[in-house]
Every structure is written in C-alpha cells, then in structure tokens.
Image (spheres, coloured by chain):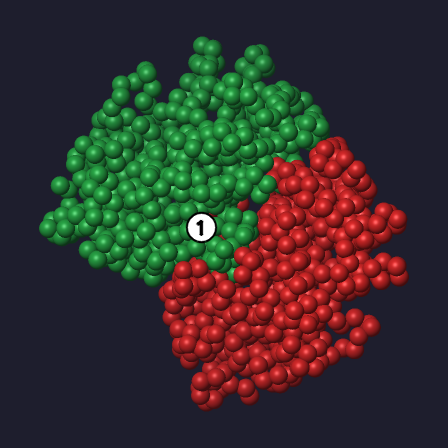
Chain colours: A red, B green
Amino acid sequence: MRVPHGIDSKVFSAAVRELEGIVGQQWVFTSEEDLYLYRDAYSPFWGEAEERLASAAVSPESVEQVQAILRIANAHRIPIYPISTGRNLGYGGAAPVYSGSVVLDLKRMNRILEIDEQAASCLVEPGVSYFDLYRHIRANKLKLWIDCPDPGWGSLIGNALDHGNGYTMNPFRDHFAAHCGMEVVLANGDLVRTGMGALPGAKTWQQSRYGFGPDVDGIFSQGNSGVVTKMGFWLMAEPEAYLSGTVMVSRHADLVPLMKAFSVLNNTNAMMATTRIGSPLQLGRVFGVPPEPEHAALLDKPGVTPEELEAYGRKNDLPYWTIDLKFYGGTEVVEAQWTHAMRVFRSAIPDVQFAKGDRLTFPLSETQAEAVKDKASLGIPSLGAFFVGARSPNKPVGSHGHFWLSPILPLSAEAVLEAQKVFARAFREWGVAPLYRALPQLYSPRAFYLLFGFEVSEDPAVNRKTRETVRRMIKLAAEHGWGEYRTAPAFMDDVMNVYSYNNHALRGLYERIKDALDPNGILAAGRCGIWPKHLRNGRS
Amino acid sequence: MRVPHGIDSKVFSAAVRELEGIVGQQWVFTSEEDLYLYRDAYSPFWGEAEERLASAAVSPESVEQVQAILRIANAHRIPIYPISTGRNLGYGGAAPVYSGSVVLDLKRMNRILEIDEQAASCLVEPGVSYFDLYRHIRANKLKLWIDCPDPGWGSLIGNALDHGNGYTMNPFRDHFAAHCGMEVVLANGDLVRTGMGALPGAKTWQQSRYGFGPDVDGIFSQGNSGVVTKMGFWLMAEPEAYLSGTVMVSRHADLVPLMKAFSVLNNTNAMMATTRIGSPLQLGRVFGVPPEPEHAALLDKPGVTPEELEAYGRKNDLPYWTIDLKFYGGTEVVEAQWTHAMRVFRSAIPDVQFAKGDRLTFPLSETQAEAVKDKASLGIPSLGAFFVGARSPNKPVGSHGHFWLSPILPLSAEAVLEAQKVFARAFREWGVAPLYRALPQLYSPRAFYLLFGFEVSEDPAVNRKTRETVRRMIKLAAEHGWGEYRTAPAFMDDVMNVYSYNNHALRGLYERIKDALDPNGILAAGRCGIWPKHLRNGRS
C-alpha cells in the first residue's frame, strides 16, 4: 500500500480502516490496479518520479460521509484530494496535485436534486455529468437547455469550479458565473449553505445570486478550502430558433476593423454567444481539412508574408479571417440579428463577405439532435472533441495525451497579432516547433483565450522539453501582461508565481484564507499553487 | 470630542493627531458640526440613544494614505467604517453600523483611472459617482453607456459592493456581477489586486473575470475585511436603438400565464432588461396619479375581491396587471423582439393587450437626454427618485426619511400572490397600516424583490413601532423562505439571524474569514451582522 509522505504507515492503515467503516470496504481503493484509474492519463510526467499519484481513493455516497471522511483526515493529517468525476483530462484528470493524497471521489453523489422548468434552474451533486443532466431533460421533455464544454462527460460542478466554459449564450457559458447557490463541507467537516441557501426552507436558493453578507462562493472555485457537495445552476429556456452565420474578410489588416465591429455587437449584447475566430488562410492546418499542396507549401515557407497569403486567398477564394456568429431566440429575432450584424460589419469593411449557416427550430427530435454537427453550440453534450486528442484510432493507446495553455489576451486584433508575433519569435529562438499557430478562442465574452495544445509523449525526454517550453511560455506571456486562467497540475506553481503583484500579495491572501479554513492543511494541497502552511516552504 | 467605546480618550486624541499627520488637519473631522454630515439622515433611530454616530471622520486622497490610516487604527484598535460616498440613503448613508467608529470617507479618491471604448470597460476609484462617469463619457463623446441605480449621485464601487442594481440590460444591472477586477487594502494595510490585476502589467484586469486561483472578490462585497480602492466595470456599448412596450392583462388570475410566458422570454434572454410589474387596478395609489374616487373607494374597501376590481377595470379600461418590456439593439432587432414577445404572450393569453412605448435611436443630444422620462432605463443618472422620499416640498425638512425592506421571492405569480396574502394578513393582525401593498420589482433577472418602503418619523414612538413591524416582517418572511439581500444598519443583525441554516454555519464561515483577515476587528464592525471577535458576545 502506498502511504502519503510523512504519515506513519500504521496510522495510514488505521485511517483506511476508518474510511472503510464510513463508506464500506468496497468504496475504499488501495490496490495498484484500482489506483491506476486515478492516474492522470495525460500527465506530462507520465512514468517519471514526479508523476503525481494517489495513495488511496475513497468514494462516499452522502454529505454525511464526506463530513466523516474529512474529520478522519483531520484527526490523522491525511492529505485529501477531492474530485467530482475526475474527467478533466488535459488539466490533471483524477490525479491529486500533491502526490500521495487520498482522492475523495464524489462520483457516487450523482443526483439531480431539483430541476425547475419555469425558473430554468437546477440543483445537482458533484457526480452529475453534462450527459446525465441532458438525458434527464430529454427524458422528461423539459423545455430547457444546458451549456456544456467539450467533451460532455465531466461534472457540472467540477467544470464550474475550475472556471470552465461552454458554447451557448453569454449568461450560461461562463459556468461558474452561471451558478447560483452552493453547499460546501469545509475542511473541518462543517456543513455550510451559501447565498439564500443559508435561510432554512429558502425558496430562492437557485434563483437569487446573493443572500445576505459577503458572497463567499468564489473562494471555493479553483480553491482548496472546502468540498462542494451541491451547486445550483441557471439553465437556458429552449429558444424558438437558432441561426448561425460566418463573416469573412480577405486581408490580414482587416482583423482590426473586424474586431472593432465585433466589439460593438458584443458589448451591446447583440452578439450573445461564443464565437470562433478562424483564419482559413493563415491557419489552414488547424482542426480542419488539410490544405491544398500550394497552400501547404506557402504555410511551410519560412517568413511567408501576409501579402503572399492574401494573393493565394484571392486566387482560391479563401478568406484571411472569419468570425462565426450564433443567434438564439424568436424566429424573426435571429433573422433580424443576422441582418443587423451584417450591416454593422459592412459599414466597417465594405467588401466583407457573409455566409449564412444553419437555421434550426426547436425542439429537435432525437434523430435531428444526433445529426447536429456543432453540438456544443446547442448545448448537446458529446465526446466529439476527442478527435483532437492522442488516443485516436491512428495512434497507439499508451501514455499519449495532451494538455492546454491559454494566455488571456485583450479582445482586439492588435493583441492577437502581437501575441502571434511574440510566440512565433520565441519558438524560433527556442528551437521549438511552432505548435500550431494558436487561434484566439472566445470562451470569455470580453477576452481572448490564446489556446495552445501540447502533446504528451511516451518519451520522458520529449516531455521534459515540452515542460520546459511551457514554463518559458508562462513567463514570456506574463512579461507581456497575459496570464493563464487554469493549467495542468505540473504548472500550477509556475502560473501562480507570475501573479506576483506587490510581492505575491494575492497568494498571501489565498494562504490566509486557506489557513483559516483548513488549519491542518488536509485539502487539495498545492491546487492552483496554494499550499498549506506545512508544505509552503517547498513551493517553488 | 466623541471617543469610540472602550478607547482611552488620550489614546484617541493621539490617534487623531496621527491621522492628521497622514491626510492633513483639514481632512480629519471631529467637530459636532462636521460630523453632522456623517449622520444617517434617514435613520429609524434618529435622535434616539441607539442612533449610530461617528466619533470622527478621515478622508484620504490616496491608497498609501488608506494603508497608513489602517495601520494607525490597528495600532490603537480604533474602529473604522469605510464609505465610498455615503449616499446610500435608505440603507444607512454615511453613518457607521457600530456607533463610535471613525468614518473612512473615500470621496476624495474620485479618479476615473481608465476607460476603454473598444473594450467597453472602466477602472474607477470609490469616490467616482454615476454622474461623474456619465459626464466623463458625454464630454469625451464615447459610445458607452453606464447602468445606474436611482438616484445617480452614489458611488459605482459602493453600490456594487452593496449588491445594488440598475435598470438597463441583464449583464450590467447586477452591479457586483458587472465588475471586473479589484484593488483592496486589507484590514492590516496590505495592498492586494485580485483577478488578472495580480499579474504585474496585466493587459486584461478589466477584461477577464478570473485570474488564477480562487475568486476572492465576493468576500469584499457586503463585507468588512478590506477597503476596496479600485474596481473595474464592464460597460455597455451604445446600442443603435431602444424600444419599450407594455403588456396588459385584465384578470387577477392572468398573472399566472403572464409570468409563465415572461419566464420563457426571460430565460432565453429574449427579454434582456429590467422590467416592472404593475397593477393599475390593485395598486392604484403607488407611484402614480391618484385614483378616481370610485376606484379609491374600492381600494379602501376591506376585503375587496379581485372580481370587484376586475369589474371596475372592465368598465374603465384599466388592466389588472402590466409588464413593461424594454429592448436594446439594432433597429430591426428591437422591432423583431417586440413582435416575438407579443406572439409569446398572445399564445398564453389570447386577449392580452399591448401598448408600444418609446422608440429611440442613439446617440441622444443633450436636449433629448434631458427630456427622457425613464432616464434609468437608458443609463442616464438623475435625482428623480427623490420624489418618493420624505424631503419633498410638501413636507417639512427634518428627520424624515425612508428605508426599504425587500424579501426576495421566486419569479412566479404564485409566489407574489402568496406573499401579498401573507403580509396583508400580518398587517391586519398586527394592527399596522398596510404600507402600500408591495409590488414585486425585477431587479434580479431570476427573482422578485418585494419592495416595502417605510417612512421615518420625527416621533421616536412612531419609529419604535416601525422598527418592531420591520423585525416582525423579517421573521415572517424567513418563515416562508424569503430572505432579504440588504437592509438598513438597524436591522442587519435581525436579517443575519434568519440565515441560520445548520446553526448559523454561514455566519460562522464569515466570522472565520473576518478573524483571519482583520484579527484586531477594526473594520466596519457589525456590517451585515458580522462582528469582530471582541464584540461578538453583544450580537443579538
């Protein structure tokens, strides 16, 4: 049996038996075979000494059991790492940040406790996945939509707590911002309901964002001072119609007026949904059909100029930049929104081109729902996103995987062009393949996420090089004022380190809260670079 | 000179001299005359022993001065009560919650530090009022809107921290939710920037809601563990057009389908702005033209039935319930939204009536802006709301004033009708005039605020009776699962007391955070019922 660092093996064995007494023997896992499932399948440390491994896992089925587990952990100073479903591959999966922690796996707490069609809200436990909620809604023919990330197998609560995003309308796609009300077991086992939930018999726990006093929910997001056992979410009512369209411009320099016009629509809420910026010319290889040989040759040409690409684009009717727009609402409203959007773009860029996309009305039948290509935009969970990963039919199943790095940029053409230049230059200097030239993603309504993907290799030497590149990128981004909003466990200390204003004052505040709420430092040590007092000297 | 309770007068005098050394003698106030301005003009304790009074006030002009003041306060254990501008009449104004506190008046820190037209965001200090920001935008011809409460003389930061609301579109009218990024001086004088602000030279402090790690901003809202010295806000870009309309139904029972249809629009974001529910029939006397004598007689008739009112309504073409709708966006979009909304209501209530309201295009000239009646809906600050108060030309200027109590209800007809019944019965039982029969306000996108207004009298006996009524209402509301989201200082302990789930676990959490961040308990003692350790025994 693996034993957490610094814990006597007899103490640990006794604690495991106590845990078994709480949840039953079959829900405490200590065998190598069982714990394999709690490895980070996409770990950039795969197979190396630094890989973060669980010493055990325990899976409770109730809030009372969670409380009891935390009391045992406090009594013996056992490090605990809570996960909802642990499906967040690319950001650490089910593995603890601090090696040797006992994973607290909440997958069995998977009840949809409430769902209110008129109020368009729900209350769920951590084990409820996007698929679970979607299927419940379809089965009960409720006129409600969910907003899901890709892929949809993860936990609503886990994704929201990690500041994850989805693809439908603004008020729903920032999953933490779309939550309403929490129940939390604090590190010491105390049970707290926040917001209106603190009022016994509250009628608006999932309707009113605020109760009375400070809004404490945020400290449990990307944090490690409590275990969230219930969380409410605002859902979207099913709209009448959906309309998508694509805006296309032909010149490199058009990105500036394109983003200006887009900002006006975006900031008046005319453009209410996630969009994607594309560049069929510049980024011909990303997530799409392979480019024609002539195009491929251009893309591979060192120092290819925008003018050369533009010339190719004119000849082959390939836009330099595109923005996808998506509208949801009354049938006449989505048409008017598209007309209005075209007018706004045309007044900024006279030769802009448009392509009208899908127009759907709801509800969709099962067959229609299956046939939808861009499922995420309609809140239909899928596993389609795994086409991007390493475990595809073309690659051997092994330790391969991927993870992400997303410096956050201002929502402007200037910022994107600068960032592309900065990183391209750095990759040349570092002698690193240019990954793919990153495309800005519009996960946030007001900022770009410049999403870089990294492949994990079976060769530790390659992984070491990748880790070094990522660490350099984190620093380089920070020097330009671009920070990450989440990261894989391997890089949490690095990212936290660059948030250093006034001698790391914010980390100091996190640590004061951590010490107050988890004095024994048992919960999720190291998560987001926040360490308990007794492990703080070791932080980088 | 007044001296805070438990502080030696010599120690206090010495502390005052130290404060003078920091900000200059002219910015420390201790005379009766100066401190009169820090009284709560609308206090329900006006002139009684329990009225909460400042012992002094100090007004810094910089963050460094705020830090120095807090260090002095810690050294001498002086209670400090920070205010932004103290204009929040009806909820305590400039007076401290804990009598004898030194008011930390941030009115001199009134710079608009950044305003970005394309990003539609700003960074301001606590002394910046809605008027200040509005005038700055007009003067610089920026195509931006603000969202203001009524009245518009208060601080953006103060209102947001108190969970205040405005009247334009959903993403902006919950003022705390519309913020992005904070700078806070903690109780011990430490300076922290949150979110992306913790990254030195951050480019997205006002664009990205999340930095890395927990989202701590909420603990400084309605809280007392820090002094917010800078705060960013998302602004709305000026839309092309505005269109309003009113939906009218004739029967009492129509409220049920009316709210159901409204919920669909609301929860698909077709209806993106604040609305008002009205009842010209049932609430003829509220905020409007006095009713006709026959109508007045009906309203005064004990036990008048909905049917009697409906009959009067049919005869006089007066709707039972109304909902005002407001749309912002492209000219063709607002028309389509109104068409769509009418279709949705008509399918729920075949004989529903509609009245199209204002249709405006922007920008407005100064003259047009002056002439707008419903200024708040267009983000134009005003002092018009004071028509409701006691200090009108028809009343003597004196200790009169008003304050509010707002139980939060589910957004449904059933909840409104139940609450009206519950409170009407209680008022009869208690022998209390029925205030005005409260109308549900749609300050929140997903819940009703049942707004009750109370007048403050010159007669302490009347105020005592009012306070007793309010305390009973707080308990009565809580028994039905309806909680308040803010309240006047006189009732903060009462409101906090009803948020009692699991033996006041949430208050316990607030107190643990308070003790960790303000160990000497110097900041805003008693705010929202959160008391520092040394005063906790006295809480009710």
Q: Nearer the viewer, residue A23 or B34?
A: B34
Residue at point 32% right, 51% down?
B64
Residue at point 39% right, 31% down?
B153
Chain letter of mark 1 equals: B
In percent of width and height, residue A220 lies at 48, 60
Q: Reply above or below: A464 against A516.
A: below
Q: Which residue is mark 1?
A: B182
Q: Nearer the viewer, residue A501 or B402?
A: A501
Query: Which image quarter holds the N terminus of chain B?
Result: top left
Residue B437 in view here: no
Residue B182 in view here: yes
Say left or right for A247 vs A208: right
Please tell me whether mark 1 sits on a helix, a strand or a loop. strand
Q: Quadrant of residue A489?
A: bottom right
Residue at point 23% right, 53% down?
B73
Q: Given the current orientation, which residue lies at the most extreme top position?
A: B293
Q: Quadrant of residue A532?
A: bottom left
Q: Amino acid at mark 1?
A: Met
Q: Nearer the viewer, residue A444 or A305?
A: A305
Q: Reply above or below: B396 against B179.
A: above
Say left or right for B83 vs A91: left
In percent of width and height, residue B303 lies at 45, 23
Q: Reply above or below: B315 against B435.
A: above
Q: Nearer the viewer, residue B388 or A351?
A: A351
Residue at point 49% right, 20% down?
B370
In percent of width and height, residue A395 lies at 80, 75
Say left or right for B538 vs B500: left
Q: Given the current orientation, which residue lies at the most extreme left position?
A: B10
